[in-house]
């Protein structure tokens, strides 16, 4: 684990505009005015390279929207495939700041700080916590993992494997990145939890200086977790880290936490940092001095370390080539990839580099079957 303390600086003005408190600071009126209604589609946001798209979700049984940023290279290099960064937003207005984030990442790509990549902005609604609600009304995790990611891979020229995916987010999105990313090291090479919350073990125990009214907090607890502490804990990054520690270490998943020193969520993030350390899960923990619950301040304050994290995650190797999805075990998923790519020579299933996925590649997967070690 790497601990660092970084001073904040200011982003360019077009990025600084998305410095919105994205914690559980949803207005109390939302709790009274039908916040439980699932808003699966949002209005479109416009910015250079940013597209608004919808797809049919099996989990939600309806149309779901998302935004996706395509770098200029996506058009100029028509046969190239690109990694994907999934950015999970905080609570409240899920479209606020998407345009500025697209410009922020696009500028970094143009400057060569990170390679050209697609940036996907899923619709997590006001306060889904990026979790399947206990009553099944808002199956948010299932929508993202089971429906959105496969749709993006089928629709766009992505590097459709673990080594081509990063999961990032702020506040509710930082907590969501921890939940989804730590649970699925087979899907994501990097997991970033920025200003993450709620990650306290007792959701109803509000942190000091919280802006979330008690009535709204109670409704969130009921709507998402059914006011069931057991369900809350089973869906908590804390418990998931315990369950998946061995797999995360085996997969060499790059994990980081970043938070402003003035953020009310610092104590719970300190606890989670210590928890990952106790579990032997390598990670970075960075406190950005003089910054509150502010996504632009945290991203800016991370400086070059921010881009180094993305580059390191995308460079994470698999221990064994036959472990095509880098899950730490050669299993049915790798076999399925060989069979689905049969005859094609453009992907990782062409293990011997012959230009075709064939019987030789199948034999290598079967010969390496089991734990990578």
Image (cartoon, grey):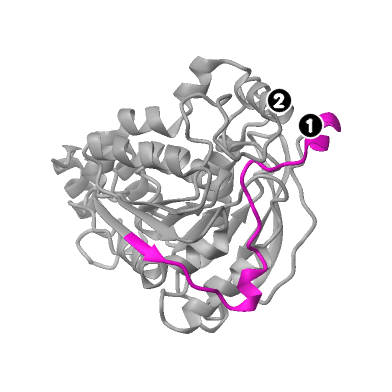
Q: Nearer the viewer, residue 26 or 175?
A: 26
Q: Quadrant of residue 43?
A: bottom right
Q: Quickly name the residue at label 2.
A: 219
Q: Nearer the viewer, residue 283 or 109?
A: 283
Q: Nearer the viewer, residue 323 or 214?
A: 214
**Residue shown at the point (53%, 44%) measured from the top left:** 264
Crowding near the residue tagged with mark 2, few <14, some 14–19, many ≥20 C-alpha atoms within 10 Å = some
Q: Is residue 191 magenta?
A: no
By secondary structure, the bulk of the magenta-drawn segment is best described as loop
Image position of 56 (left or right of 360): right
Image position of 63 (left or right of 153): right
In the image, residue 350 sits, relative to residue 177, either above or below, namely: below
In the image, residue 87 sits, relative to residue 219, either above or below, namely: below
Q: Position of residue 185 (x, y in %)?
A: 35, 43
Q: Position of residue 202 (x, y in %)?
A: 50, 24
Q: Position of residue 261 (x, y in %)?
A: 45, 54
Whether pointer 1 and pointer 2 mark residues with C-beta atoms closer than 8 Å, the reply is yes
Disc 1/disc 2 C-alpha distance (Å): 7 Å
Q: Position of residue 234 (x, y in %)?
A: 45, 23
**Residue shown at the point (71%, 33%) measured from the top left:** 213
Query: Can residue 157 be seen here?
Result: no
Disc on res. 31: 1
The magenta-colored residue range is 5-34
């Amino acid at each position: 684990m790497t601990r660092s303390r970084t001073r904040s600086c200011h982003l360019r003005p077009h990025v600084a505009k998305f410095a919105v408190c994205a914690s559980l600071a949803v207005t109390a009126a939302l709790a009274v005015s039908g916040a439980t209604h699932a808003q699966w589609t949002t209005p479109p946001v416009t910015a250079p390279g940013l597209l608004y798209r919808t797809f049919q979700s099996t989990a939600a049984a309806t149309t779901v929207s998302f935004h996706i940023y395509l770098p200029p290279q996506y058009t100029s290099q028509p046969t190239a495939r690109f990694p994907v960064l999934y950015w999970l937003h905080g609570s409240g207005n899920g479209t606020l700041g998407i345009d500025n984030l697209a410009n922020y990442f696009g500028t970094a790509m143009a400057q060569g700080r990170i390679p050209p990549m697609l940036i996907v902005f899923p619709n997590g609604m006001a306060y889904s916590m990026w979790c399947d609600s206990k009553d099944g009304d808002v199956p948010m995790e299932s929508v993202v993992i089971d429906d959105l990611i496969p749709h993006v891979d089928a629709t766009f020229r992505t590097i459709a494997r673990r080594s081509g995916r990063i999961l990032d987010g702020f506040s509710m999105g930082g907590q969501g990145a921890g939940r989804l990313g730590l649970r699925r090291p087979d899907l994501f090479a990097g997991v970033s939890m920025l200003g993450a919350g709620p990650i306290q073990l007792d959701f109803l125990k509000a942190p000091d200086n919280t802006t979330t009214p008690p009535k709204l907090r109670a409704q969130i607890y009921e709507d998402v977790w059914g006011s069931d502490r057991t369900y809350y804990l089973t869906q908590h990054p804390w418990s998931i880290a315990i369950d998946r520690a061995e797999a995360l270490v085996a997969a060499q998943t790059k994990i980081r936490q970043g938070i402003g020193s003035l953020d009310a969520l610092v104590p719970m993030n300190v606890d989670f940092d210590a928890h990952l350390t106790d579990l032997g899960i390598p990670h970075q923990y960075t406190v950005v001095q003089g910054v509150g619950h502010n996504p632009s301040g945290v991203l800016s304050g991370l400086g070059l370390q921010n881009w180094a994290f993305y580059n390191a995650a995308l460079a994470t190797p698999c221990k064994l080539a036959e472990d095509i999805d880098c899950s730490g075990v050669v299993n049915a998923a790798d076999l399925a990839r060989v069979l689905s790519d049969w005859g094609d020579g453009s992907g990782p299933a062409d293990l011997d580099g012959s230009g075709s996925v064939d019987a030789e590649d199948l034999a290598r997967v079967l010969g390496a079957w089991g734990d990578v070690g």
